[in-house]
Amino acid sequence: EDQVTQSPEALRLQEGESSSLNCSYTVSGLRGLFWYRQDPGKGPEFLFTLYSAGEEKEKERLKATLTKKESFLHITAPKPEDSATYLCAVQARNYGQNFVFGPGTRLSVLP
Amino acid sequence: NAGVTQTPKFQVLKTGQSMTLQCAQDMNHNSMYWYRQDPGMGLRLIYYSASEGTTDKGEVPNGYNVSRLNKREFSLRLESAAPSQTSVYFCASRGQNTDTQYFGPGTRLTVL
């Protein structure tokens, strides 16, 4: 059974304090791994797609990396506006339309 | 360009009542999805439609029905609402040549 877990469940950082969020997955044949950001009361907003181990993507203060078993979302010098829930999802090759989401990491960045 | 829109934003039902959640996208996407999101759990797929005229069950389809009315619209129906269906419902769409899903703002449903 395809599974996605995320850690930590919640994370509080001071502004400027860099850290990483973890997404661990078990899937039979990864087609893609996705990171989304979700603000309270809103729908998830797409951040990155990673397709193969070793791949990296960057956007402003965020950098996503992928290994064969997990992905990391690195946040460098975060700002209060980075506060949100970050969701990870995987898509398996043999379930083309089925995306399995993790429960998310709730990030708070304090000024 | 509104992206993915959902109506209503909030709804309160009594057990046994029925209702339809509406979703529309203006990005000419082929695939559309309905998810539910519950506290402490990831988004769970209820139904999806790979193209106009087709629908398939996801992980948690029991108690729901869907209609792909046309390429733009994908509705989710609760025939006899139960308290276990209290959740936030998200619609999403995806283009043919991309794996990226675009989500609507959600419908917060409470079943008493």
Image (cartoon, rainbow, N blue to C red):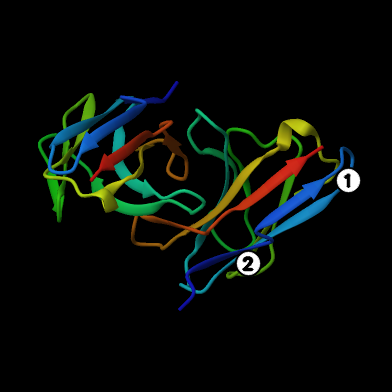
Q: Residues within 10 Å of mark 2 (few under 14, many from 20)?
A: some
Question: Would residue A48 appear left or right of B37 to someone viewing this image?
Answer: left
The residue carrying mark 1 is B17
Q: Quadrant of residue A107?
A: top left
Above or below, A81 against A66 in this view is below
Image coordinates for residue A8, horizontal then vertical, percent = 31, 24
Can the viewer see residue A58?
yes
Residue B13 x/y as whole percent:
82, 46
Q: CA distance from mark 1 to mark 2?
A: 23 Å
State the image coordinates of residue B92 (x, y, percent, origin top left).
51, 55
Amino acid beneath label 1: Gln
Q: As drawn, is A92 to the left or to the right of B82?
A: left
Image position of A70 (left or right of A88): left
User: Would residue B49 be visible to someone looking at this image?
Assistant: no
Which secondary structure, mark 1? loop
**Label 2 belongs to which residue?**
B73
Residue shown at the point (67%, 37%) measured from the top left: B61
Picture quarter with the N terminus of chain A:
top left
Report the residue at 63% width, 67% height from top. Answer: B73
Q: In the image, is B3 to the left or to the right of B70?
A: left
Q: Is residue B34 depicted above or below B94 in this figure? A: above
Which chain does the numbered disc 1 sit on? B
Above or below residue B19? Residue B80 is above
- Of the image marks 1 and 2, the number of the one nearer the N terminus: 1
Q: SS for tag 2?
A: loop
* Of marks 1 and 2, the one in the foreground: 1
Q: Please state the horizontal and vertical placement of residue A6, each as a whole percent of the image.
A: 34, 27
Tag 1 and tag 2 share a subunit: yes
- Residues B90 and B49: in front is B90
Q: Amino acid at mark 2?
A: Glu
Q: Chain of mark 2?
A: B
- In terms of depth relative to the viewer, which is nearer, A95 or B26? B26
